[in-house]
Image (tube, helix red, strand yellow):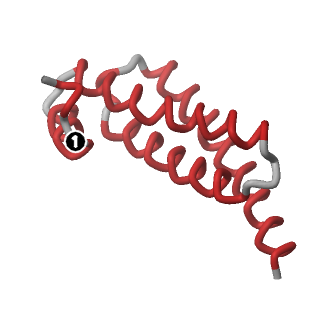
Amino acid sequence: MIQEQTDENLIARTLSGDRQAYRRLMERHYRTVYRLCRGVLRHSEDAEAVHEMRVGIRRLRAALRLGKAALPVRRREALARELQWLGRELGSVRDLDVQLAN
């Protein structure tokens, strides 16, 4: 069953052209990033949520690169740009948090 598969299994299936596996991989990490975003918005003092969100975005970007055959080029490029922007913004927030902690 695809829902119980590890990221590694889903990535392997994605690389072999399995679009369902790619969708599941993207959904899995998109929800994590979304949940963490909500956590940051409700608790702006929680720096760990920012870090976790950055990790989730990096994973989502990696999955996007691995599954490039599963999405139309324009959608993939648009999503990649948005994730890159969000990663940069969160990096700035994390850098500021580190500076304030020291």
Q: Nearer the viewer, residue 27 or 73?
A: 27
Q: Is residue 56 left or right of residue 11?
A: right
Where is residue 92 drawn, in percent x and y?
77, 58
Where is residue 18 drawn, in percent x and y?
18, 23
Does residue 91 sit above or below 59 in this rendering?
below
Q: Is residue 33 left or right of residue 96?
A: left
The quarter of the picture where residue 98 lies is bottom right
Does residue 46 sit above or below 71 in this rendering?
below
Where is residue 100 drawn, in percent x and y?
86, 73
Residue drawn at 69 percent across, 39 percent down: 39
Does residue 30 sit above or below 73 in this rendering?
below
Residue drawn at 23 percent across, 26 percent down: 3
Q: Which residue, given by chain and number where applicable, does mark 1 sit on?
A: 6
Pointer 1 local density, CA inside 10 Å: few below 14, some 14–19, many at least 20: few
Q: Nearer the viewer, residue 68 or 4?
A: 4
Q: Nearer the viewer, residue 81 or 35?
A: 35
Does residue 46 sit above or below 33 in this rendering?
below
The quarter of the picture where residue 29 lies is top left
Q: Is residue 62 left or right of residue 41?
A: left
Q: Nearer the viewer, residue 25 or 48?
A: 48
Disc 1 residue type?
Thr
Which quadrant of the figure contains the N terminus?
A: top left
Where is residue 67 drawn, in percent x and y?
31, 32
